[in-house]
Image (tube, helix red, strand yellow):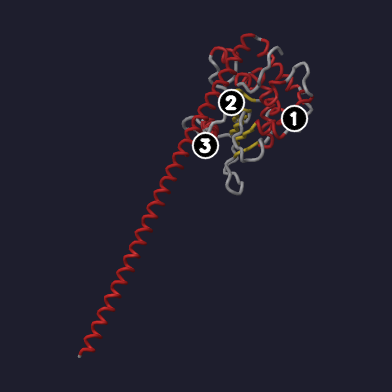
Amino acid sequence: MRHAIDPKIDCVFKALLGAEANRDLLVHFLNAMLGGELPAPIVDVVILNPYNEREFLDDKLSIVDVKARDAAGCLYQIEIQLLVLPELPARILYGWADLYSSQLASGEDYLELKPTYAIWLLGETLLPAVPGYAHRYRFCDAAGRPLLDHGCVALFELPKFAAEHATAAQQAAGQVAVASEEERWLKLFVEGEYLDPDNLPPWMNTPEMRRVMSTMQGFSEKERAYHAYQARQNYLRQQKTIQRRIDQLTADLEREQTEKARERAEKERAQADITRERAEKERAQAEKERAQAEKEHAQAEIERLKALLKDASAD
């Protein structure tokens, strides 16, 4: 391979899983990633938005997910997202709901709806506080009982997978074994851009992974395809750089607002302290004046009583 190719770049991703020539790869991928979620292994699928070379060379690859339907009518959506934004969970759920609802034409019955599965590979961590790299969501009650067993949304956080499945030494030596086909595919997306097709590690020695490498080599060896790949890669890098700058500016603004709020709170506390001290002084002065008034009243009473005694003595 003359150039390193990252399978996470959307045009490569869609060529791997969305091309008619690689339909068997898509079937293998779906069975690997969904595993026990499926009532039976998928045998074949129809790709609803198939990839072709002209699509990304001429149309800038505006649609980057892969949609498919199997022989039972079940629907599948596969997407890779390198940049995780706050609105991503809502986007994921909306995408699943949109595909699920698209099954019915006007006048068709709800009983005709088929299970729908969404698979998302994430290039950044979405759920830092949640352990594990794989997350599957269904419509269930608090006890885990499904309202309707009509598919799921499966999320795979690639950074967590990379951190959990290899030591640095093992990664360097390419000696990390894979325990399942799911792990093999995830490892491909984590390490694929660093693989040498002439010296593949043992975990890549399967018919499916050799097909994957062949597709990736096509991007590397065809000049026009490689330039398009570079354009997509540069666009995604720029997008990520812009988003990080937005995040930085947002964080700076939030820090500035927090600092202003802190200063305002401190000023209000200081003003409250001044007001409290003034009130205490006023109370102390009032107490002093009251004590003085009581003293004067007592002195006046003494003088009055003395005068009465004097008058009584004179009589």
Mark identifier at residue 67: 2
Give x and y (percent) for residue 289.
31, 65
Q: Quadrant of the N terminus?
A: top right
Q: Residue at x 26, y 82 (%)?
A: 306
Q: Secondary structure at mark 3?
A: helix
What amino acid is labelled 1 in the image? Ala
Image quadrant of residue 210?
top right
In-image side of 43 versus 175 (left or right):
left
Q: State the separation of the CA atoms marked 1 and 2.
A: 36 Å
What amino acid is labelled 2 in the image? Lys
Q: State the separation of the CA atoms marked 2 and 3.
A: 21 Å
**The residue positioned farthest toward the front in the image shown:** 314
The foreground one among 286 and 126 is 286
Give x and y (percent) for residue 120.
61, 30
Q: Residues within 10 Å of mark 2 (few under 14, many from 20)?
A: many
Please give the residue where the numbered disc 3 appears in the rendered image: 110
Q: Residue at x 39, y 48 (%)?
A: 271
Please give the residue where the numbered disc 1 appears in the rendered image: 168
Q: Which label's residue is closer to the chain start, 3 or 1?
A: 3
**The residue positioned farthest toward the left in the image shown:** 315
Q: State the separation of the CA atoms marked 3 and 1.
A: 51 Å
